[in-house]
Image: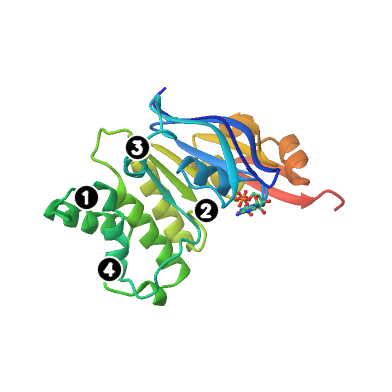
Amino acid sequence: MRGLAVERLAVAVRGRMLVDDASWTAPAGQITALVGPNGAGKSTMLRAIAGVVPERASRSGGVLLDGERLDTMPARERARRIALVEQSTDAVPQLTARDAVRLGRTPHHRILGFSLGDEARVEAALADAGAGPLADRQLGELSGGELQRVHLARALAQRPAAGEPSALLLDEPTNHLDVAWQLELLALVRRLADDRAVVMTVHDLALAATHADRVVLVDGGRVVAEGSPDAVLTADRIRSVYGVEATIDAAPDGVAIRYRRMDA
Ligand SMILES: Nc1ncnc2c1ncn2[C@@H]1O[C@H](COP(=O)(O)OP(=O)(O)OP(=O)(O)O)[C@@H](O)[C@H]1O
């Protein structure tokens, strides 16, 4: 399969399973939404795929990109293929947005360092993520949504040349974004998914059902279901995983979901 395959991934800290025997796929050319309650293990899964695990954690299982094992690949090579955009990347406040995005090109540097081609990729990534006007601002003075766009630009700058297998992992990318920027971001993510696997964690199940091609539902570190949004996001599953009643309706431009408490 072209894309990402997660095979029996497990992450444990002091005997506690944060990710528990999780297997799922994210085909290239599609957007896969990773959904589940707070603490379900979504961020831990994305980080483990990118090769990052908590201190003193043990990890097992495999991750393949286009059939090639990522977990045994040298870190630099893996960093060229997998870009992870996190909710709260430890940003250096004095860095300008452009410099932060330049860091995304680091895994591609050869001995001579930054090339003109790298500069062009940085400017294009800033523009694609809607962060062009922010390029000379310092990270410490940006709003949450502005910072989110800079993080996305950095991941875009990191991606390899077209045609090379790659995956983009986005942890709550719509967080902090106003509605207009959410739609911009989702359109951009759709374009990026054209030739790569894109995985995004989201809490908004209607957004996942409307914009993702596939949904992976996790709970307690385990995969509860995976497949098309309408197969995975049923009222029964939402009740058993989130403990709320849901009414799911087809809307002209996607899916609308209303929630109420079980005892209401
Ligand atoms: N460094 C760590 N050490 C120990 N436990 C951790 C660590 N990081 C996360 N956890 C625990 O792992 C579990 C999964 O956390 P994770 O952040 O992956 O969940 P999530 O699904 O992304 O949640 P949310 O929707 O709230 O962001 C949680 O119980 C969390 O407390």
Query: Of helix, strand and loop, which one carries label 4?
Result: loop
Asked if one can make out residue 105 in the rendered structure from this viewpoint, the answer is no
How far apart are labels 4 and 1 at the CA level? 21 Å
Q: Which residue is painted at 52% across and 59% down in the image?
A: 175
Side of 98 relative to 220 (left or right): left
Q: Which amino acid does label 2 sit on?
A: Glu
Looking at the rendered structure, which numbered label has been put on residue 109? Answer: 1
Evaluate if marks 3 and 1 touch, with contact meaning CB atoms under 8 Å apart. Answer: no
Q: Earlier in the sequence, mark 4 or mark 1?
A: 1
Figure label count: 4
Label 4, residues with CA under 10 Å away: few <14, some 14-19, many ≥20: some
Looking at the rendered structure, which numbered label has been put on residue 166? Answer: 3
Spot the residue most to the right: 263
How far apart are labels 4 and 2 at the CA level? 23 Å
Asked if one can make out residue 118 in the rendered structure from this viewpoint, the answer is yes
How far apart are labels 3 and 2 at the CA level? 19 Å
Q: Which residue is painted at 72% across and 50% down in the image?
A: 259
| 163 versus 149 height, above or below | above
Q: Does the residue labelled 2 lie within 8 Å of ligand 1?
A: yes
| 201 versus 91 height, above or below | above
Q: Earlier in the sequence, mark 3 or mark 4?
A: 4
